[in-house]
Image (cartoon, rainbow, N blue to C red):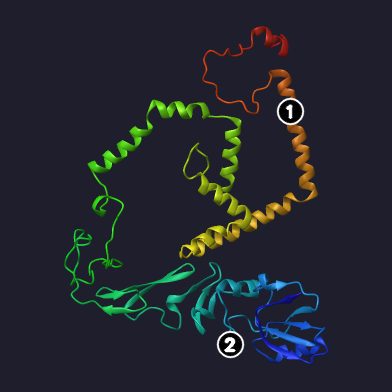
Amino acid sequence: MMLQKHIFKTITGAAFGDVCLRECYRDVRCQSFNFAFTQDKCELSNRTKEARPEDFIPNSERYYFRRDMGRTHLGAIPELPADSCKEIKASEGGQAVSGLYWLNFIKPDTPVLAHCDMKTEDADECNAFIRVCDENADCKNTLGSYRCSCKTGFSGDGHTCKECQNCQSLTGADRRINYTNQDTICDNGLRGWYRFQGAAGHTELPNGESLHGEPLKNAQSNIFSEYATDIVVKKLSPSANCQRNESLNNTIAKKTPKTRYYRGSASNDFRVACGVAQRNLGYGYVSAALEVLDIEPGYFCTSHEDLMDKKVLSDRNRKATKNFKYRSNQLRGQKSSQKSQKEAKEGKTYETAVVLNLDTSVNQPSPRTHTHVEHLFGKHF
């Protein structure tokens, strides 16, 4: 076994592992090492397998050793900054407490001292020992990130704010695309509102304006009236319910956000694609799709994906055990036996490929008579 991707120093001519251990003791950055015994080589790492389990891989020519004495806690010194508060917690386990740590993700390639909350695994970038927003901006810490917004009288992205010239408080009408006063470059009344340089609005609607009032009511009425017809009802009713449809409904519902498949739905291809992607790629397919669209998935999204992937893996391992398979076969046999007993008494109540029949000319089975009941239960009721 070996830990890859975190080797910061290589030592050759090491015939024995104790040479690697001695060199690791001498370097404050050393958290662990790999000893390549076929090459007489030491590979010092600034991470442990606990901090980066995804980088701990099998290797028949190396063995891994975690520094056993005098190891500096991850993030405790600027020479050993952490990539996140979560990484510190994973590395140190129960010894990790909330406090100040050196982190290297707040400012690229620069260790920054900031507070880590080990309960939420979040760093407070706004109170770090380095300014992350412009001096004329307000900083708001969020879980997994932070947000900068320019103060009143300034405009910009929060990281760079310039004093606003000719500031005004624009009305709702002023913010429309046909507003002609090009000299106004800043809205002093609402933070976070900016004038668009080009056209803005709903370009697919007439004049690029939203529908409201009577036009909105008429548009909705036209949509409902189109589908509320006898023709649509006649087409949908014969397929209202059948065992095949229910089987498909349940299959789709397990893999996608929607809980039911409506016949002829235009979104079915999308939902089936989501189900296939989740089966093949795991829940991380959501983040992958967002990244293709240049959208940041966010902390809650990725955390939920990790949690669900772990649950799926745990459930898969549970179902692979002999006890589960034995119990599953046992319950299946019991269910089959119970079903056979009911069918022997009451007859079949549900069969494959039985669909809703709207033909009133077909004779329906007559209800059971008093004599049938006496035959099944005796005369003691």
Q: Is residue 268 visible?
A: yes
Q: Is residue 271 above or below residue 287?
A: above
Image height check: is 255 above or below 52?
Answer: above
Q: Residue furthest left?
A: 181
Q: Which residue is mark 1?
A: 338
Q: Quadrant of residue 192?
A: bottom left
Q: Nearer the viewer, residue 70 or 56?
A: 56
The residue type indicated by label 1 comes to Gln
Closer to the camera in the image, 122 or 279:
279
Check contact, mark 2 vs mark 1: CB within 8 A. no
Residue 319: x and y, percent? 73, 49
Give the x, y percent position of residue 128: 45, 80
The total number of labels drawn is 2
Report the side of 161 relative to 320 (left or right): left
Q: Secondary structure at mark 2?
A: loop
Q: Residue furthest top?
A: 371
Alpha carbons under labels 2 and 1: distance apart:
69 Å
Instruction: Locate the C terminus and report the quarter of the image it occupies.
Output: top right
Residue pictured at 68% horizontal, 55% vertical? 314
Q: Residue at x 49, y 63 (%)?
A: 292
Please state which amino acid type lies under the numbered disc 2. Glu
Residue 272 locus on image (x, y percent): 55, 47
Neighbour class for label 2 at 10 Å: few (<14), some, many (≥20)? few
- The reply, left or right, for residue 356 in relation to residue 136 is right
Which of the labelled discs sits on residue 79, or is there none? Answer: 2
Pointer 2 or 1: first along the chain: 2
- Please indicate, yes or no, whether residue 257 appears anywhere in the rendered image: no
User: Where in the figure is residue 35, as x and y percent of width and height?
Assistant: 77, 83
Left or right of 275, for residue 128: left
